[in-house]
Image (cartoon, coloured by chain):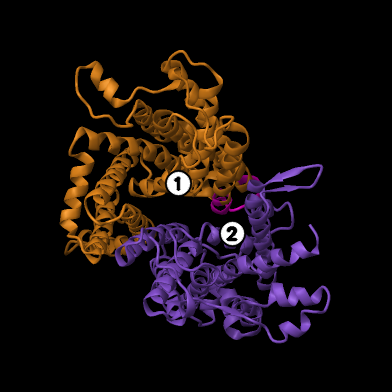
Chain colours: A purple, B orange
Amino acid sequence: MGFIDIIPILDSTIRLATPLLLACLAGLFSERAGVFDIGLEGKMLVAAFFSAAVAAQTGNVWLGLGAGIAASMVFALIHGVASITFRGDQLISGVAINFLAAGMTVLIAQDWFNQGSRTPSLFGASRFGPVDLPFADQIASIPIIGPFYADALSGHTILVYVGLLAVPATWWVLFRTRFGLRLRAVGENPGAVDTAGVSVVRLRYAAVLICGLLCGLAGAYLATGLAAGFTRDMTAGRGFIALAALIFAKWRPWYALFACLLFGFLQAVSNRYSTLDFGIIEIPNAFVLALPYILTVVILAGFVGRATPPRAGGEPYVKER
Amino acid sequence: MDKLPKWADIALIPAINLALALIVSGIVVAFIGENPLNALQIMVNGAVGSTYGWGYTLYYATNFVFTGLAVAIAFHARLFNIGGEGQAQLGSLGVALVCLMVPWPHWTLALPAAIVGGAVFGAAWAAIPAYLQAKRGSHIVITTIMFNFIASALLVYLLVETLKVPGSMAPETARFPEGARLPDAQAVFGLFGLSFARTPLNISFIVALFACWGLWLLLWRTRLGYEIRAFGHSEPAARYAGISPTKITMIAMLISGALAGLMAINAVMGEQERLIQDNVLGAGFVGIAVALMGRSHPVGVLIAAILFGALYQGGAELEFETSVPREMVVVIQALVILFTGALDGMVRRPLESAFLRFRKQPKPGVAAE
């Protein structure tokens, strides 16, 4: 595996890491505010469907993106109503959302397009096209950095760069703004936030809606950037890998970027090679694909550093009377 | 004091939740352009209108009883076992190995052995998340989700690399020998001279009924069952009473995994008669809905499983006769989980205050307590 092989792998690493990254940051907001979310997968899936469906109907990918985000935020709101207002079980609500998305998307796709649970293929303006970063051509001739910048980093769709920029933005919002301080506090000790006269309910709703927004971007990227149209269950467990990345990153934005790049890299490698042959041992493809999940279990077990979730995560807040 | 009378808790609230889920489903059906009442009629007729319908309904129900009981016993210990899917996959591996390794002379010998195989493999797959939760504090929901994916990768690997029939392309094992095939309902009813349509319903249904009864005995008639329920109600109180959290977590999850693994005797041994890649088909997740709707009681689980079995069979008929795809079942299932599980408080709280208002009116002239 020489350097020439590395560039296309890095290129698809970034491509494959983007939906994970957006979903992972989505989960980060929600879980930092104390609302567990195993419904990332479902929200991505509805967003993927509605963005592709509206883009196919209107021929405008931006309208598709808007529809995807809106659909994902509606699902986020359902999760919010169930787990914040009615203090239901957040995990069960997440499971319900995943099922609702899996069923609804196929149902509506069949009803609208009659193409066996898929949307028509997207092309031209109904899809996100590649964006060339500035000076890509000029830098391309510089060894090592050049090909990396021009071929791996440049030439992705706009949502990839949105995803990358979302990392510092998330960091800034969470750690440098008053809203972020309160949001983190509400995930650690909602009682204290309430005592300080700040609404726990409103903060948690805000977090859940931001989560919906980011999942919407992730889903829209899947259907209109990475692929050209929606197909049944196209998220294929990415929501759960994002969840795994979130734990791997110990609920921190920069670590989330690296975790998602790592998991994207694993996916890229296993897409390219059916088995990895290191001479002495041969690693089967199935193992590479399962690696994110295995790593997450190992991290959760505390064998490699301890991942401590936000303390009030998963618990509905009951105001004292 | 309980805020609600018992009948309201175990019958009224689930009924209202279910009704809400069905009303929303009806709206979805209407949105697709079908008459909801007509669709309901097709589904009911398709599920219970013939021995064919009943056969499929009870075949699906058998799967859901096992996975539903698996989720239910974990719920009693306040553990949310979302890994029924993976445990059932491993159970299917256990059942397949048992069936293929030994040249079974008769199914009466093969069935007990397969039960042990499925249960042991399912329990083993649940044991690791259970141990990590009990000893290292890893969140059991997340680990069991991860174990679902690992199980499916493991099964793919085994089917492609080692268990596949040599020379064949399909990632599946050889067919089980004649002696390891379970008699189906047609054969059993035939013994009594009754006619029954050819369906995958088989003798595992009886095993499922025994599993319900056994779990009821365990939970409400043994010391261990008491400890599991006490632990689920209040961990600090249970700990104070000398109940070991580690032990209860491990035992509850082992039984849970074993029950999920038993699903394979119905699906793999009873129907497919060979090990294929997707043999669980989401039944592990249906178990969550079944356990929620059945209020984690074995009888409730049995009723809910039959209802979901009817839903699955009715959904297939619906797809056959109308333009409503089979995924309608998944939507209904999602709504059942949403309303009975996550939005329970939406129905419960107004109902509680209504009951309190009716009951607690102090008689005039009697001093308030």
Q: Where is residue A241 in the image (x, y as percent from the top left)?
A: 59, 59
Q: Where is residue B256 in the image (x, y as percent from the top left)?
A: 49, 39
Q: Where is residue B134 in the image (x, y as percent from the top left)?
A: 61, 45
User: Mark 2 or 1, which is nearer the eye?
Assistant: 2
Q: In which quarter of the image is the C terminus of chain B?
A: bottom left
Residue at the top extreme, as displayed? B105
Q: Which residue is tagged 1?
A: B75
Q: How many labels does the image show?
A: 2
Determine which of the numbered discs, if any, sits on residue A241 in the image: 2
Which residue shows up at 47% across the image and 32% down it?
Answer: B223
Q: Nearer the viewer, residue B253 or B202?
A: B202
Q: Give the range drawn in magenta.
A: B134-145
Q: Which of B24 and A56 is in front in this view?
A: A56
Q: Quadrant of residue A89?
A: bottom left
A283 left or right of B68 in image: right
In the rendered structure, the residue with mark 1 lies on which chain? B
In the rendered structure, the residue with mark 2 lies on which chain? A
The local secondary structure at tag 2 comes to helix
